[in-house]
Image (cartoon, rainbow, N blue to C red):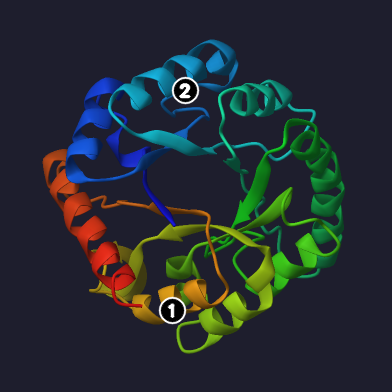
C-alpha cells in the first residue's frame, strides 16, 4: 500500500513547502487536488500538473492520485485532466459527487449516473487511468455502499472503481454496515481514504465530526486486516480534515495519523 496525504487542508502552503513538510513527516506521496479551489484549477491542468509532479518528485514524493470534481466526460477540462494525468504517470483519479435529490428519485439518478460513467470509462480506457467514486456520508448518492455497488454494476473496476472511505461508511453504518459495505465492494476497491469520525452533541443535535485516528468509531485494525485479506495494493490517502485547529496543529496531527496507520500495518 502506498500511503499518501490528501492535500485539501494544506492548500494555504506553497506546494514546494507542503511537499517538503510531508516528505519530512514520512509520507510516500500526495493526493493532489485538481479542482476548483484546489492546488490546481481544472483550466490550468495541462500547464500546472506537470510542474506539480516535478516539484513533488524533487522532495522524494509521488503523486499516484489526483482528486477532481469530474462527473461528466464532456464537462470542460475533463479530457485534458485525464490526458495530462496519464502523461504525468498518475494512475488514479477521484471523481466528483452527485447529490441525492430525495425520496422516489434514487433509481432514476442511479441510471443517469451510470450513463455518465460509461462516457468517463471511455476516458479511463483511453488514458489507462483508474477513476473511482468515493463513499461519502450524508445526502450524496455514494453514501450507501449498496448504492455504489449498483452504480458500478458491470463496470470494469480497473477503469471505474470504488474509492472507499471507512470513516464515512461508519457514519452511515456504524455497527456492521461498514463491514458489509467492504464485503460488497470487495473486488472493486481501488483506493482507500483514511479519517475517523465521532458523533458529537452540539446543542440539541448530534454531528458527525472528524477526530484523530483511533479516537473515533472506525475499527481501523479490522479495516486493514480486510484490505490485506483482499490483497489491496492501491493508494491509501490520509485525510487530515481537522476543521477546528490551526494549520500548524494539522501538520502535527498528520504525523500522528501516519504513525497510527503504519503501526497497524506493521502488525496485520
Say if 202 sits above or below 44 in the image. Answer: below
- Indicate which label's residue lies in the foreground, 1 or 2: 1
Say if 259 sits above or below 249 in the image. Answer: below
Residue 267 screen position, x and y as percent: 29, 76
Residue 91 screen position, x and y as percent: 59, 39
Question: Which of 38/104 is in front?
Answer: 38
Q: Which of the two labelled residues, at mark 1 and mark 2, occupies the earlier sequence position?
A: 2
Q: Quadrant of the C terminus?
A: bottom left
Residue at image location 82% in from the left, 65% down from the top: 153
Residue 237 in sight in this render: yes
Residue 158 screen position, x and y as percent: 72, 52
Residue 70 screen position, x and y as percent: 65, 36
Side of 90 where 217 appears, left or right: left
Residue at image location 79% in from the left, 51% down from the top: 113
Say if 182 sits above or below 36 in the image. Answer: below
Mark 2 crowdedness (10 Å alpha carbons): few <14, some 14-19, many ≥20 = many
Q: Which residue is mark 1?
A: 225
Dividing the picture into quadrants, the one containing residue 100 is bottom right
At numbered mark 2, what does the secondary structure look like: helix, strand or loop?
loop
Q: Quadrant of the N terminus?
A: bottom left
Q: Which residue is mark 2?
A: 40
At numbered mark 1, what does the secondary structure look like: helix, strand or loop?
helix
Residue 218 in sight in this render: no
Q: Please count the marks in the image.
A: 2
Amino acid at each position: 500500500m502506498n500511503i499518501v496525504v490528501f492535500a485539501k487542508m494544506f492548500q494555504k502552503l506553497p506546494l514546494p513547502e507542503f511537499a517538503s513538510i510531508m516528505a519530512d513527516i514520512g509520507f510516500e506521496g500526495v493526493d493532489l487536488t485538481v479542482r476548483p479551489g484546489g492546488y490546481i484549477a481544472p483550466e490550468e491542468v495541462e500547464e500546472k500538473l506537470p510542474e506539480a509532479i516535478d516539484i513533488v518528485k524533487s522532495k522524494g514524493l509521488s503523486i499516484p492520485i489526483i482528486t477532481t470534481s469530474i462527473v461528466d466526460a464532456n464537462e470542460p477540462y475533463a479530457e485534458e485532466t485525464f490526458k495530462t494525468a496519464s502523461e504525468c504517470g498518475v494512475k488514479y483519479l477521484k471523481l466528483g459527487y452527485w447529490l441525492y435529490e430525495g425520496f422516489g428519485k434514487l433509481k432514476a439518478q442511479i441510471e443517469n449516473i451510470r450513463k455518465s460513467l460509461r462516457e468517463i470509462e471511455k476516458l479511463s480506457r483511453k488514458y489507462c487511468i483508474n477513476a473511482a467514486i468515493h463513499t461519502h456520508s450524508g445526502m450524496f448518492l455514494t453514501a450507501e455502499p449498496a448504492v455504489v455497488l449498483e452504480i458500478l454494476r458491470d463496470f470494469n473496476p480497473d477503469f471505474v472503481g470504488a474509492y472507499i472511505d471507512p470513516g464515512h461508511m461508519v457514519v452511515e453504518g456504524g455497527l456492521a454496515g461498514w463491514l458489509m459495505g467492504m464485503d460488497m465492494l470487495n473486488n472493486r476497491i481501488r483506493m482507500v481514504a483514511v479519517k475517523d469520525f465521532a458523533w458529537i452533541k452540539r446543542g440539541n443535535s448530534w454531528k458527525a465530526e472528524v477526530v484523530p485516528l483511533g479516537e473515533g468509531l472506525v475499527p481501523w485494525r479490522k479495516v486493514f486486516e480486510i484490505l490485506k485479506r483482499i490483497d489491496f495494493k492501491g493508494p491509501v490517502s490520509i485525510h487530515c480534515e481537522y476543521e477546528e485547529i490551526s494549520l500548524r496543529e494539522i501538520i502535527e496531527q498528520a504525523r500522528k495519523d501516519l504513525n497510527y496507520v503504519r503501526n497497524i500495518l506493521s502488525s496485520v
